Amino acid sequence: MSAPRTGTNIPIIRAATPEDAPSLSTLVAQLGYPAPAEAIPSRLTNMGRSEDNTVQVAEEDGQIVGVMTARVMWVIHLDAPLAWLTALVVLDSARGRGIGSMLLDSAEEWAKHMGAQKISLSSAMHRTDTHTYYDNRGYERSGLRFTKKLGAG
């Protein structure tokens, strides 16, 4: 059963702007990646330098309730670009209302528009509910993610 919609409007999906930084900071922290609000505008600028990146937000009644980031890239093993969903998160209080699905639909449509043959993502091992969600959306489990920190920062 979905949580009741608290807002009066259907959420809109739009490009993120520097003014969204405080909300984006809160959302990204929910994923376990603290990102100070003051750092986000320059990150958006850096991401915006290439058409191969997108940062989209879900806005409901003037409040940012979700964010999706994705990129496309060429890889040696595909004949078309690969899209990578780098982040998808919905505000805890706004979950269960289809906002994540709206953002994922937007990511998939953007990826198709960019000529991607596939879309991939990684998800933290402990997010089992999220894994089930992606299973139900037609995503296939295909491996593990490994991360190594390179230098300071």
Image: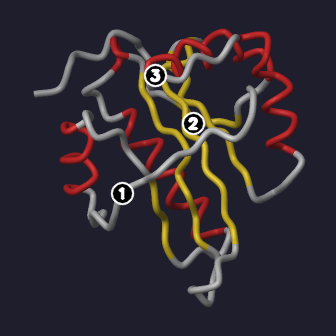
Pointer 2 residue: 13
User: Is there a contact, CB below 8 Å, between mark 2 and mark 1?
Assistant: no
* Quarter containing the N terminus: top left
**Residue at image point 46% right, 51% down:** 146
What separation in Å lies between label 2 and label 1 (alpha carbons)?
30 Å
Pointer 3 residue: 32
Of the image marks 2 and 1, the number of the one nearer the N terminus: 2
Which amino acid is tagged 2?
A: Ile
Image position of 125 (left or right of 106): left
Residue 26 place in picture, x, y as percent: 54, 12
Which amino acid is tagged 1?
A: Leu
For residue 93, which numbered disc appears in the image?
A: none
Badge 3 element:
loop
How many residues crowd mark 2 within 10 Å: few (<14), some (14–19), many (20+)?
some
Residue 95 place in picture, x, y as percent: 30, 23
Pointer 1 residue: 144
